[in-house]
Amino acid sequence: MNMKEAYEKKMQAQLDEWDADIKKLKAQADKARADAQLEYFKQIEGLRERQQRAQQKLTEIQQASDTAWEDLKAGAESSWDSLADAMRAARSRFK
């Protein structure tokens, strides 16, 4: 396995983990009081948008050549950091 494949595998595993976390947060939101649900659902929508951007970056890397993917890595890592920060914030709000 080369560096690109290892990076893709790592990022896909992280996206899958975040997807499971978002589903758990949605289940919590479904059980929340009606006034809190609206805020929770807004947060979940924002997480899904960030998740889609991160998935798009991963797709770009997967489609890039073995030499060009390094150029895309910085943009992908920025999307990842944004989603990771949003996930941490959402988890703390949902407690």
Image (spheres, rainbow, N blue to C red):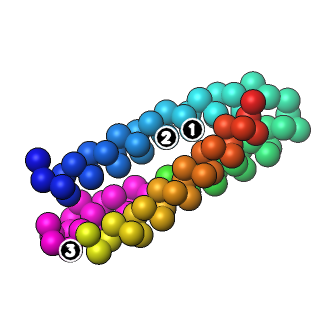
Between marks 1 and 2, how big is the CA–CA gap?
6 Å
**In the image, what residue type sits under mark 3?**
Ala
The extreme right residue here reads: 35
Task: Report which residue position mark 2 lands on.
Answer: 18
- From which residue to which does the magenta span run? 54-69
Label 2 and label 3: CA atoms lie apart by 27 Å
**Dots 1 and 2: beta carbons under 8 Å?**
yes
Q: What residue is drawn where x is 32% and y is 71%? A: 72
- At mark 1, the secondary structure is helix
Give x and y (percent) for residue 94: 73, 34
Residue sitting nearer the eye, 59 or 66: 66
Q: Is residue 73 visible?
A: yes
Q: Is 75 situated left or right of 64 in this image?
A: right
Mark sitting earlier along the chain (1/3): 1
Residue 65 lies left or right of residue 51; in this view the side is left
The three-letter code of the residue at mark 2 reads Trp
What residue is rendered at 64% in x and 28% in y? 27
Q: Please, what is the dominant secondary structure of the magenta stretch?
A: helix
Which residue is the site of mark 3? 68
Disc 2 on helix, strand or loop? helix
Outermost residue on the front side: it is 3
Circle 1 sits on which residue? 22
Question: Is 53 situated left or right of 47 in this image?
Answer: left
